[in-house]
Image: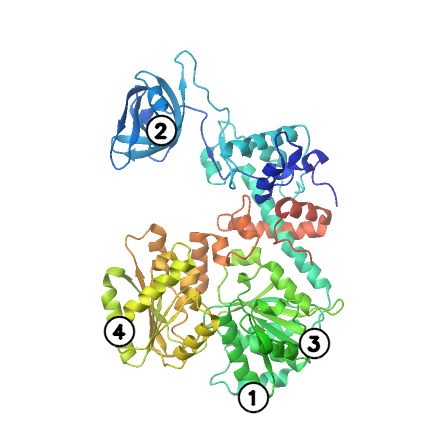
Amino acid sequence: MPALTSDRLQKPVTELKGVGAALAEKLAKLRIFTIEDLLFHLPLRYQDRTRVTPMGAARRGDEVVLVGQVALSDVVKGKRRALIVRLQDGTGSITLRFFHFNAAQQKQFKKGTLVRCYGEARPGASGLELYHPEYKLVSAEQPPELDDHLTPIYPLTEGLTQNRLRQLINLALAELKRTEVVDWLPQSLFPNLPSLKQSLELLHEPPPEAEVEQLLEYKHPSQHRLIIEELLAQQLSLLKLRQQHKHHQAPVMDNGQHLCEQPLAQLPFPLTGAQNRVVHEIHQDMTTNSPMLRLVQGDVGAGKTLVAAMTALKAIGSGYQVAVMAPTEILAEQHFNNFRQWLEPMGLEVAWLAGKVKGKARQQQLDKIAEGAPLVVGTHALFQEQVQFQKLGLIIVDEQHRFGVHQRLSLREKGRQGDTYPHQLIMTATPIPRTLAMSAYADLDTSIIDELPPGRTPIETIALADSRREQVVARIAAACREGKQAYWVCTLIEDSEALQCQAAETTFAELQEQLQGLNIGLVHGRMKPQEKAEIMARFKANELQLLVATTVIEVGVDVPNATLMVIENPERLGLSQLHQLRGRVGRGSQQSYCVLMYHTPLSYNGKARIAVMRDTQDGFKIAEKDLELRGPGEVLGTRQTGLAQMKIADLARDQYLLDTVNQAAKQLLQQHPDHIEPIVQRWLSGAEQYAQV
C-alpha cells in the first residue's frame, strides 16, 4: 500500500514531546494513534479571541473578549452565594458572576483594576453577564494580549482538556509545516478546491480575517475540501465491500416457484403491484451465481413479511436452508409464528433459536438446524459459534440497521462453503431517506415496497396536551367497551431503562385504578422474554383490552383489533420511532386513532415533530424530516457504525454533495484504484464500518 504521507506524520503520538502511555490511551478513545490522526481531528466550532468587543456592542449569546475597569465588586446572597464584579469600558458595562470563588480572588477585583475576560454574554438581573469567564488582570500601559487566529474547539474525551489537545495539535502542525501530506484526491476531479495541506492548516488556525460565519456553517472551501474526502472514504469503503462481495460465488436458485404458489392461493387478496415487483427483483438476483445483497424498504404494514416468505420458499424449493434473523425476541417470535403458519401446512419444518431457548430445548433446535431444517428463525443467537447449518443458502435480516455490519457478515460466514456464500435479503420498516441509503447502504441493491395492501384505513392522528389526560382515559374506556383494543405507550425517560420501566409500572397501576372492569396488561424491557411473550399472546387473543408498554412494541406486533394508541410524551422520541409505533394500529379495516399526548411547553423540535405526524403517514417524508431534525446517527440507530462518528461531514447538512461524491467514487475506482485504500484508511481507520471481508 502506498504511504499516506511522509513517514514523519505516520509516527505514533508517543513520539511527540510530553505524550506518555496514559495520554496515548486517552487519545486512542478519540481514534488518534498517529501524528496524522491529530491533524484530522477537526474543530467542532471556533471562538474569536482576536479582537476586543466594546461592552456597548455585546449581544446576548455572543462569545466575546472584553477589557474594562472594575466599578464595583461584592458578594451577594440569594439562592446561591455569588461574587459579582461590575466592569465598564466607556461604551457600557457588564457583570461577571462567579459562584465558585475564594477570598484571594475576591480581593483581586479592587475598584479601578483593569481586567481582560472572555465568555458568553447572557441576560442577567442587571443587563448582560458573563458566568465564570476566563479572565486576567492587565496593566493600562500594556495592550491586552490577543490571539492571532480564531480559537478552535475540539471534540474531547474524559481527562483531556481543550488546552492540552490544542498543544498537541500545534506540535502536529509544526510537523506538517516541515513535510508534505499526500493529497489522494486527483485535482482533475475537484479542480477548484484548496490543497489538503492548506485546508488542514487553515481549519486548525483560521486567521482573524477568516469568515467566521462561513466556518460556523461549514461552508468554507477548506471545510468543503475535507467533507468531500470524508464522504468519499465512507462511500469507497462500502463500494469496496460490494466489489469484494460480488467476486464471491453464490448458489443458483432456479426452482421453488411451485412452493411459492401454495401460500399465495390461500391469501384473501392478491399481492400488490409493488410486492410483485420486489419479489421478481429478488428472484432474478437468486438465479445468478453472484451473491444477492438486497435491501427491501417498506413502510409499516406494506407486506414485507410476505415478500420474505416468497424469497424463503424459492430457496427451500431449490434445496437450501434459510435463516431469518430479527433484532428482538418479540419480533423474532412474530416471524416464527407467521412462517410456521405458512410453511408447516406444506410439510416444511421451522426451527426456532433465541436467547431464552435453553438446555435440552436448545440442543433439540441446534440438532434440527444441523440436520437441515428448511427454515430457521431467531435473534442474534443464530450466529453463535455452536450453531451449524447443513446447507445455508439464504439469510433474511429484519431491521438490519439495528445490527452492526460485522454481525451481518459473521452470519454470512455461517453459510460459506469454499468460495460460495449465501444470498442475503435485508428488510427494514424504517424508511431510509435517499441520502442516507446512498451513503449507509452503498453496498446493497435497493427495492422499495411503496404500496399498502387493500383494506387499510388511514390512521387519524390527534395531538393533545397531557392536561386533557382524563378525556383520553374516557376515550379508551369507551373504545374497549365497544370490543376494540388499545395501546398506551410510555416513552423513554432520561435515557434510563430502569426509570422507563418504573414509569410504565406507575402508569399501569393508575390506569388499573381508573379503568376498573377492563383487563390491562403491561410489557417493558426488564421483564423476562417469556413473560413478555405471554402478555403479548393474551393481548393478541383479545383477553386483554389495553396494553401498557414501553417502546418495546415498536416493531413486529400485529393485532388487527387494536384501533387506538396513546403515546405519552411523544416529544421525547424521533419521528421514525413515532411512525413505527403508530403503525401498530390501523392493521385492519376499522378506523384507527393515534393520540400524541404531549407535555407543555413544547420545544421548536417537539412542535415540528408533532406537526409532521399529524400531516402525513408517508414514512419516507417522515424519515426525511427526522434526518433534518435529528441527524443520521439517530435515524439509522446507534449500531449503524461509522456514520455517527464522522469527523467533519454531516449527511443531513451535506446531502447536496452526495451525487457529486458518488460520481467521484466510481471514477476513483476505475481510474485511480491505488488511491482508495489510503483515503479509506485516513478517515476510517479504527472504525468498524470498514470491514475486511
Disc 3, SS: loop
Query: Where, quadrant-wise, is the C terminus in this rendering?
Result: bottom right
Q: CA distance from mark 3 to mark 1?
A: 23 Å
Mark 4, residue position: 515
Instruction: Categorize mark 1 by other alpha carbons within 10 Å: few (<14), some (14-19), many (20+).
Output: few
Q: Residues within 10 Å of mark 3 (few under 14, many from 20)?
A: some
Which residue occupies the foreground of this view, 199 or 570? Answer: 570
Q: Is residue 97 above or below residue 641?
A: above
Q: Judge left or right: residue 581 versus residue 237.
A: left
Is residue 131 positioned above or below 350 on the image?
Answer: above
Gap between marks 4 and 2 measured at Cα: 56 Å
Say which residue label 1 marks.
345
Q: Earlier in the sequence, mark 3 or mark 1?
A: 1
Q: Secondary structure at mark 4?
A: loop
Q: CA distance from mark 2 to mark 1?
A: 78 Å
Question: According to the image, label 3 marks what residue?
Answer: 390
Distance in Å between CA atoms under marks 3 and 2: 72 Å
- Residue type of the residue flagged with mark 2: Phe
- The answer to the question of whether label 2 and label 1 lie on touching residues, with beta carbons closer than 8 A, is no
Which dot, 4 or 2, sits closer to the camera? 2
Q: Which mark is residue 101?
A: 2
Which kind of residue does numbered mark 4 sit on?
Answer: Leu
Labelled pair 1, 4 in contact (Cβ < 8 Å): no
Q: Which residue type carries mark 3?
A: Gln
Query: Mark 1, mark 4: which one is toward the viewer?
Result: 4
Image point (35%, 20%), residue name? 108
The residue sitting at the front extreme is 359
